[in-house]
Amino acid sequence: MWRTPHLAAKNRTVASTVTVGDAKYRLLTKTPTRTLRGRPTDGPMDRQGQMLDRLDAPAIRQWSVAAAAVLEEHRQEIDDLNVFPVPDGDTGTNLALTVRAAADALALDASVSASAALQAMARGAVLGARGNSGVILSQILRGLAEDDRTPPVEEFGAASLQHALRNAAERAYESVNQPIEGTILSVVRAAADAAQAVRLHSGALADVVRAAAGAAADALARTPEQLPALARAGVVDAGGRGLVLLIDALVAVVTGAPISAAQPQPRLARSLEALSAEREIGSDEFAYEVQYLLEAGDAQVTLLRGDLAQLGDSLVVVGTGDGVWNVHVHVNDVGAAMEAGIQAGRPYRITVTRFADATTRSALEGPAQAPGEAAGPSLTVGPPVSAPARPHGGSVTAIVAVAPGEGLAHLFTAEGVVVVEGGPSHNPSTAEVLAAVRGSTAAHVVLLPNASQIAGVAEAAAHEARAEGIEVSVVPTKSPVQGLAAVAVHDPQRRFDDNVVAMAEAAAATRWAEVTVAQRESLTSVGQCQPGDILGLIDGEVVVIGAAVGEVAGIVADRLVGIGAELITIVVGRDAVDDDVQALVTRLAASAPLVEVAVFDGGQPHYPLLIGAE
């Protein structure tokens, strides 16, 4: 909503073509440009055909509204680009909600400078970010808003915008522990490169944003060449598609033209058959990859390198120049690697990954042979616990966990955990997780995301909480069963750092499996699946496709037992059938009599069964 603006018209003469990579961009020639100035009011404004040469706060507000609208319009299209067949929190929905949060925050802000408006927009995105894609997009907006120039920029011209795009690309890459090309990262970098190249030849804001949009679209079309999973599915990267729409909305604001939202076509240099995925095997000698960011001094990092070199291999420690280091190592003793980081400084954004070693590969190839007959297993059947939770108000340490079902929420709260509602159909926002951390009133908080797609949101909430003086560590749990294992070893009498190490070790030692229903046609590592097929996943990878939940669950459980499980935890979902659960328990009694089995009612949607193996 806008008042009639003051329009300052002038002619700008540009007559050249700029080449960026394989693309050529035609620059404007004697095009009248106008600066939009005004304040939001109750009246609509038709800007069709108007051209801006500066972006001020009102124009940025208009961009935020346009971006939120176009992402909402294309939400389903982007959701459908998801190459994984399980309901894991769709990208289009996450991006739309993140940008809507940014637009809402800016609508409530009275900033008059372009820099301040972008900062309000970025903060709204950070707090409202949902899913990993939303978190990365929030970091791109944060990069656009950050500017080391003084005083703050009142209006963005071509040079200022080009500088901001470069900063946004750098911020996006820095926000990811292991940047992967063929994603939104490649798209934002291409946009920044094109803006920089065109800026050398033209001072027109429209030239810069058009070049950025064109390069972003080209980079998006090339993503299948960089990620084999995209090539097999014949789609482009979903997060990158969302970013292209965001930049297209900016082009529309600057040029006054309608938003160009044509669906991109993947560009493949080779046939799909030639693009095969190679799975990372890791070190043969060491079972785990440990990675974290560390705040520490140079002297402490020198000692850390020596300590970690004695624990494992593939050691990489790189710094940013301001006391923050990225630490990567392959080890067998996860706790020792994390303890070394704690001794050196303050580790955070911790990631622990188990390598697919020879034992695991053998287990995935087929079920283990059943041992000889014996007495039935030790079976513990536990319905949702209704015992009152231990309050954390005023306590020294609290645990905050995301739980996708009422039964799982009861299991966590019975152990004194503060629960945030979440799951495949509802990824909590950064603001929701942050509110739970604040509400715990604890000085030290352990965060359990319990899903890969929530890890970025948990890290963003932890970052905000640390700025408020709350010490927060995120234990990278990828499933609720890993979260339950972590909570089981928490000891209120231990030091906070020691608890974090113990909980991370327990989570990493827990293999996790899921039985779910395929949502779309997809090519998996074990073949093609169709909507309605039953999928069995171990550690997030599809290992079996079947027609019945009971059949698939039995195969998955056999493989978990075959890799040495001593305790099997079964969490029963909302759509599970009692006969399938009983059949699974009976099967385990016959095939693994020495394995303890615990069954809980989780009530989680979309996943009839979650299975953990410790």
Image (cartoon, rainbow, N blue to C red):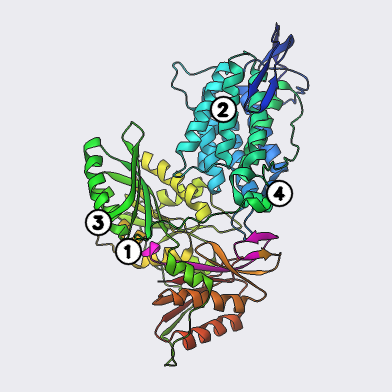
The crowding category of the residue bearing disc 3, from other C-alpha atoms within 10 Å (few below 14, some 14 to 19, many at least 20), is few
Query: Can you give x and y, in whole percent of width and height, for residue 379 in the image?
Result: 44, 84
> Dot 2: what SS?
helix
Q: Give the amino acid type for the residue marked by disc 3 in the picture.
A: Arg
Task: Judge whether residue 1 can be spotted in this image.
Answer: no
Q: Quadrant of the N terminus?
A: top right
Q: Identify the residue at horizontal 45%, vertical 76% (top origin).
A: 562
Q: Nearer the viewer, mark 1 or mark 2?
A: 2
In the rendered structure, which disc, 1 or 4, sits on the residue that comes first in sequence? 4
The crowding category of the residue bearing disc 2, from other C-alpha atoms within 10 Å (few below 14, some 14 to 19, many at least 20), is many
Query: Can you give x and y, in whole percent of width and height, for residue 376 in the image?
Result: 44, 90
Residue under numbered circle 3: 495
Residue under numbered circle 1: 490
Q: Nearer the viewer, mark 4 or mark 3?
A: 4
Q: Nearer the viewer, mark 2 or mark 3?
A: 2
Residue under numbered circle 4: 76
Magenta-colored span: 506-527
Give the Cα separation between the discs numbered 1 and 4: 41 Å
Give the Cα separation between the discs numbered 4 and 3: 46 Å
In the rendered structure, which disc, 2 or 3, sits on the residue that comes first in sequence? 2
Give the Cα separation between the discs numbered 2 and 3: 45 Å
- Is residue 486 or residue 271 the one in the foreground? 271
Q: Is residue 164 magenta?
A: no
Q: Identify the residue at horizontal 52%, vertical 22% (top origin).
A: 163
Residue under numbered circle 2: 192
In the rendered structure, which disc, 1 or 2, sits on the residue that comes first in sequence? 2
Q: Give the amino acid type for the residue marked by disc 2 in the picture.
A: Ala
Up-down: is 93 above or below 398?
above
